[in-house]
Amino acid sequence: MFHYKSNTLSVYFFLFFFKLILASSFTNAQTGITPPSGGSNPTSPNNRSTHYNQIGWYAFFGTIKLSSKFGLHTEYQFRRNNLVTDWQQGLLRVGINYQVNPRVLLRAGYAWAETYAYGDIPINALGRSFTEHRLFQMAQLSHKEGLLELQHRFMLEQRFVGRYSSTAVEKEDEFPFMHRARYMIRLQAPLKGREIKDKTPYAAVYNEIMIGFGKNVNANIFDQNRIGLLVGYRFSKTLRIEAGYLNQTLQFGRLINGRNIFQSNSGLIVNTNFNF
């Protein structure tokens, strides 16, 4: 087990707020789903349609240390459909880190995402790409149990998702406001020796669930779930590279012909991590 210092009170408030959001979201989901005409239940397995895509996510993460407590987080994710040939999404994220103690990291920042029209049924109802702007707040808790290193990441996002008011407009002219809560658990262990240090290979597994909430979340509160299985190598304190398998299960925010639409996207993930 691990213990927090007294100056981590803000983290407790963050986690408590996070739990309240999840509880509120599930309550709204149970009372706020309206069946489509004909009386069918959109939550029934018979009213789900799943579409499959092969994806490749190639990401750069860079952390620049500004002082003993503060740092700059930079990130770009080059997300492709059909492994590499077509766009799925481009994601840029920047933020300010605050290292409360060796086990607690706080971050706040901004993200820009461009989602493209990919797959059999594009996410956008008009079959177009769309832009999203986000603000986010994050708390990451780390601890070690024997050989195993664990991370818990809690994140809140305030999302402004681009939308076209009609087929006549060429660019998004509406940006409805949505909230999303995210939780990720990651476990990693060395494949040589008893700790992950310089010139050490390692294996990692993670799972992340995302829950949407707020008045502009329509057909679902479940947004997506991600599972990753990775093998990595830490070259030094500055450079770490990992690659492996990723599965993304994503639910559309709208019904189509009274059915919930899911994507099951699986493929390759490659992460390059720099710490300066």
Image: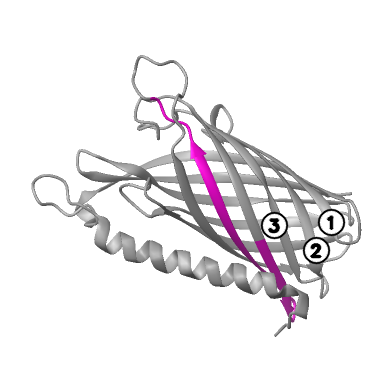
Q: Is residue 118 magenta?
A: no
Query: Which is closer to the viewer, label 1 or label 3?
Result: 1
Residue in the image at 77% along x and 75% along y: 7
Q: Which residues are magenta?
A: 139-164
Which residue, given by chain and number where applicable, does mark 3 sit on?
Answer: 231
Q: Is residue 68 left or right of residue 224?
A: right
Marks 2 and 1 sit apart, C-alpha to C-alpha, by 6 Å
Q: Position of residue 70 (x, y in %)?
A: 84, 56
Residue in the image at 81% along x and 71% along y: 101
Q: Considering depth in this image, is 236 or 91 the residue closer to the camera?
A: 91
Marks 2 and 3 sit apart, C-alpha to C-alpha, by 27 Å
Q: Quadrant of residue 255?
A: top left
Q: Are marks 2 and 1 in contact (CB under 8 Å)?
A: yes
Name the kind of residue labelled 2 in the image.
Answer: Gln
Name the kind of residue labelled 3 in the image.
Answer: Val
Q: Position of residue 24 (x, y in %)?
A: 39, 65
Q: Is residue 99 left or right of residue 136?
A: right
Q: Is residue 3 left or right of residue 156?
A: right
Name the kind of residue labelled 1 in the image.
Answer: Phe
Which residue, given by chain and number where applicable, does mark 1 sit on?
Answer: 70
Q: Is residue 152 magenta?
A: yes
Which residue, given by chain and number where applicable, does mark 2 sit on?
Answer: 99
